Image (tube, grey):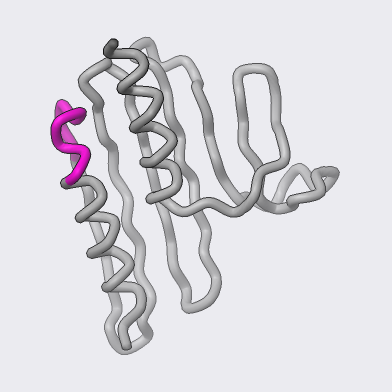
Amino acid sequence: VFMTIRYFEKIKKRIAKLEWLIERESIDTEYDEDADIGNIGGSIVFKDGSVLHFKEIILREKKQYRFHYMDESYNLISRWDNAPHHKELGTFPHHVHLPNGVKENKPVKLIDVLDIIETIVIDRLE
């Protein structure tokens, strides 16, 4: 049952697998077992100096998210979110902000973003 808590456990396991690339992390979760809703948020600083600020809110079937990834100087690399602006995009409300503008993007979860960032950090450290 309790899909939300299982999902948070999966996220924590995924982050644990990235420990070798992480300088420090701060993660908070809130969870209401009766309603099976919750949120997870925080920040991760990677060994290359890049930073991910994240927030994922789960209200049963509905998810709100914002994953803001920056370089060591806090310049935007990517920000994935589903805030209901950019109605002109075919993937509305899902989109990604890049240094050169906003693009269509499929819905993403924190684990998807961690997969992308893992590749970026490894490339930047080589």
Q: Quadrant of the N terminus?
A: bottom left
Relative side of 81 to 24, left or right: right
What are the residue bounds of the magenta stretch? Answer: 17-25
Instruction: Identify the residue at horizontal 62%, vertical 37% (top origin).
Output: 96
Residue at position x 15%, y 37% in the image: 19
- Residue 54 figure quarter: top left
Residue 7 drawn at (x, y percent): 33, 67
Q: Position of residue 8 (x, y in %)?
A: 28, 63
As drawn, is 112 to the left or to the right of 31? right
Which quadrant of the rendered structure holds the C terminus? top left
Q: Quadrant of residue 21?
A: top left
Choose between 30 and 123: the one closer to the eye: 123
For this rendering, which residue is in front, 35 or 96? 96
- Looking at the image, residue 91 lies above or below residue 76: below
As rendered, which of 29 and 109 lies closer to the eye? Answer: 109
Q: Is residue 33 left or right of residue 73?
A: left
Residue 10 on the magenta segment: no
Q: Nearer the viewer, residue 60 or 3?
A: 3
Instruction: Look at 44% across and 35% down and name the residue there.
Output: 116
Residue 19 lies in the magenta-colored region: yes
Point 37% across, 85% down: residue: 35
Q: Residue furthest right?
A: 88
Task: Locate residue 49: give its quadrant.
Answer: top left
Would you say 57 lies left or right of 87 here?
left
Marks counted in the figure total 0
> Quick check: 18 above or below 63?
above
* Residue 122 drawn at (x, y percent): 31, 22
Q: x, y percentage for residue 118?
A: 34, 32
